[in-house]
Image (cartoon, rainbow, N blue to C red):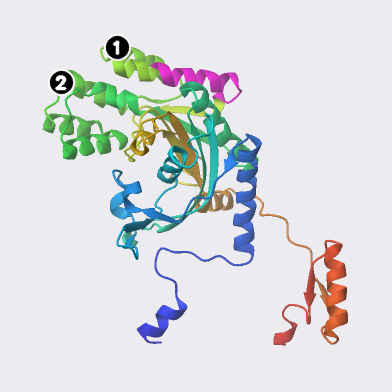
Amino acid sequence: MNGNNRSLVQVPPGVQCFVGEEARVRRAIEEKVVGVFEGWDYEEIIPPLFDYADVFAGGDLFPRTYSFPGRDGSLLALRPDFTSLLAKIAAGRLSARPLPLRLYYSGEVLRYEPPRAGRRSELYQMGLEHLGGPRVASDGEVLAVAAECLEGLGVTDWVLAMGHVGVFAGLLPQVPIEGVHMQRLRDRVESKDPEGVAEAARAAGLEVRVSDGLVRLTRLAGTPDVLEEAASALRAFPRALEAVAELRAVIAALEAAGLGARLAVDLGEVRGLDYYTGLVFRAYAPGLGFEVGGGGRYDTLLARFGRPMPAVGFMLGLDRLVLLLERQGLAAPPPLPAAEVVGADAPGADLLRARTLRREGRRVRLGAARGEAER
């Protein structure tokens, strides 16, 4: 087969196609997650598949966005995530609605991933956004919804690893740090590399007490009790202490709700997306070497669209959930009942019989049973 013909029968690298049982498994997971969202009174939103490219500008996803010129000369882009789109819609079309807004979505996003990264460019995400609510209460609510999703799917031994980017930000001087140095600091803190953090801090010209505080972040992880150690270690940094106190308040609410055993703290968690400003979290479970989902607070994003308000949200990756449930040996959806074969010799009578069976809720198949036609 030559190259031209191959392109007609193969899908491009990074995109996906699911058929039959594969599709049923994914649909069953989606229905359970969406059912949880609606059970917490979140309203579904189906945003556009593409929008003006500048909607997605300013974050680290922008360089990986698929963009193309519109017929009117404008620059458009396929959505690389949902959060920016929902922020724009909340500031525009939904501007007259009372707060807080509770919105959920389920659909595909597309962003470039190099083939060598072993990742796909087409991803299916299910998530929600809580817009305009009080910080601690809405943070706790969103985390409780994420917990119920994992519980409802039967995931075993899952954990919500929580952090707060205000701790990291509260250690830094008010003077902006050059971009390359800031990125290096964030990378080394998130990689739990104390030597790398110290080296990056020196390169950025940070004073020793700041460098020491950043190095401590790489070790401040574990059970929620680690927040006591953090409060003591970071007492010279008032803004960082405020973030620790806020995270402690969210954890206290979740513990009171019976979720204490499922919580972990990681103060070295510094999300890569630029719009996170407060709480951040990731969901982990045995069977995957990476998170199955996550989210956080992004209080400054909606100001870009002219409607400043606090906001928090999270998403679960459907592709990762499928893989996780498979590795944990959790049951697939029950098989469909066998279809009743209705002969196709008398089309009118056979169609009438098939419609009668369908009104009774039964599966039907016109003509020969599946597979018989090939024999």
> In the structure shown, which secondary structural element does the residue marked by tag 1 occupy?
loop
The amino acid type found where label 1 is placed reads: Arg
The amino acid type found where label 2 is placed reads: Val
Quadrant including the N terminus: bottom left
Circle 2 residue: 208
User: Which mark is on residue 235?
Assistant: 1
Instruction: Left or right? Give the position of 27 relative to 266.
Output: right
Residue 14 highlighted magenta (yes or no): no
Task: Determine the image quadrant of residue 365.
Answer: bottom right
Q: Badge 2 local density, few (<14 within 10 Å), some, or many (20+)?
A: few
The magenta-colored residue range is 245-260
The residue depicted at 22 percent of the width and 34 percent of the height is: 185
The residue depicted at 33 percent of the width and 55 percent of the height is: 65
User: Which mark is on residue 275?
Assistant: none
The residue depicted at 15 percent of the width and 20 percent of the height is: 208
Instruction: Left or right? Give the position of 207 relative to 268.
Output: left
Q: Badge 1 local density, few (<14 within 10 Å), some, or many (20+)?
A: few
Q: Nearer the viewer, residue 40 or 169?
A: 40
Image position of 174 with respect to 123: above or below: above
Image position of 295 with respect to 363: above or below: above
> In the structure shown, which secondary structural element does the residue marked by tag 2 occupy?
helix
